[in-house]
Amino acid sequence: MTFERLGTMNVNAEGHLEIGGVDTLKLAEKYGTPLYVYDVALIRDRARGFKKTFEELGVKAQVAYASKAFSAVAIYQLMAEEGLSLDVVSGGELYTAIKAGFPAERVHFHGNNKSVEEIHMALDYGIGCFVLDNYYEISLLEDILIERNEKAAVLIRVTPGIEAHTHDYILTGQDDSKFGFGLTNGQAEAAIKQVLHASASFDLIGLHCHIGSQIFETTGFKLAARRIMDKLVEWHQTLGFDSQVLNLGGGFGVRYTAEDEPLEPSEYVRQIIEEVRDVASTNAIAIPEIWIEPGRSLVGEAGTTLYKVGSRKEVPGIRNYVAVDGGMSDNIRPALYDAHYDAVLAASPEKIPEETVAIAGKCCESGDMLIWDLPLPKSNAGEVLAVFCTGAYGYAMASNYNRIPRPPVVFVENGIDKLIVARETYENLVQNDLPL
């Protein structure tokens, strides 16, 4: 059996799955299971690849990590090391950035309902910019800035009316969305006028859009870029507004299974730049600084979750179930999005499959199924199952459903493993509970 070796994945001399030069069986023994394992070299490679593409094409840019994909102090510090900016969407993510010592001027604050407390926290930290999402927020932020006698750099989020080819639940750029101002219905222009009118409080540096997630083709990105650039040409003439920044978000697809065929991350960037350059040169306007916000495409394929096999149930003529010691509490995506994954036995990743099984989680929920049809060799209780491409929206969306503690997170690089998030304990589960 062959499997897709992502990043530094290898089969070592013992025939075991190895990541970052570390035997995954030894990781499971040392830290227990379930366990999230991140290939740091792959994350670095992806970050450098995005930056290199902009540099090669001579375009001023920022690559901001969309940290909702996986938020922790150590991953923020890793992104800072690689010279990336940071996209946060809540006070919790911002607080994590502060604790990580992330450079404030490279923090961009998103979200469709920022609270007064979150805005003050961001201003106190001196973040780089706010991304304005609705008229209420424009007025709220302006009032706070007047009260503080401060001025803030802002982008306006627009919805360009593009439907990306992805799961409906993660479409965010179409007209009917809770995010942003409509580009085609006049809302975006009205928002720009309102922000420009409040120039004592706002420095309007540009526009932002995000058309969706897990997108495998460039058509949507190119169309969004062209629609916004066409509008920028119009607003240059009618409003005297010149956008210094065009933030085209993220959503670049990754490989979860053999059915997924994403482009190289650099290819998305190249085609976006071509579209922006074409409109700019045709209309003799300056090319704005281009920002992108990869999240999943930076950390998704770098993550692997290790589970321990437990019980087995055979339903004659229908299906064989193999249960593991985790499930929807550490990976909600199969239940929430019908997401698909590949997996192997860590002790024998290249062994020829002998059966097709369904990987069941341990939660008291019939929908707690991680993988429905997985070819595997015969497995026994206690063996370690490695599920690939769990680096995005695994730990980030984990819960304590059924009062199951969240797993730890380990970074591996150059033969060294480092614990960066400790395993929750039962005591952690009740520490905020109060008695009658």
Image (spheres, rainbow, N blue to C red):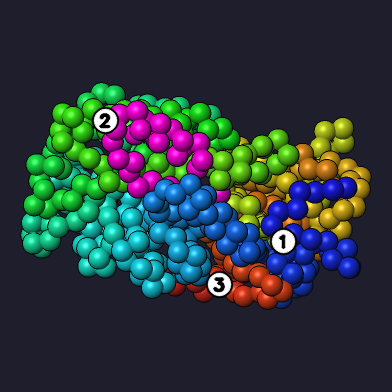
At x 60%, y 74%, the residue is 419
* Looking at the image, residue 169 lies above or below residue 397: above
Instruction: Check if residue 271 falls in the magenta segment.
Output: yes
Q: Earlier in the sequence, mark 1 or mark 3?
A: 1
Tally the numbered discs. 3
Quadrant for the C terminus in the image: bottom left
Q: Position of residue 267 (x, y in %)?
A: 56, 41
10 Å neighbourhood of mark 1: few (<14), some, or many (≥20)?
Answer: some
The type of residue carrying mark 2 is: Val
Q: Earlier in the sequence, mark 2 or mark 1?
A: 1
* Looking at the image, residue 75 lies above or below residue 146: below
Quarter-wise, where is residue 320 in the image?
top right
User: Distance of mark 3 from mark 2, alpha carbons?
Assistant: 47 Å
Give the residue number, with chain letter if any, for mark 1.
8
Q: Position of residue 34 (x, y in %)?
A: 67, 62
Q: Which mark is residue 233?
A: 2
At x 54%, y 58%, the residue is 48
Q: Position of residue 371 (x, y in %)?
A: 71, 43
Label 2: which secondary element: helix
The type of residue carrying mark 1 is: Thr
The type of residue carrying mark 3 is: Ile
Circle nearer the viewer, 1 or 3: 1
Q: Earlier in the sequence, mark 3 or mark 2?
A: 2
User: Which range is magenta?
Assistant: 269-297
Give the residue number, with chain letter if any, for mark 3.
420
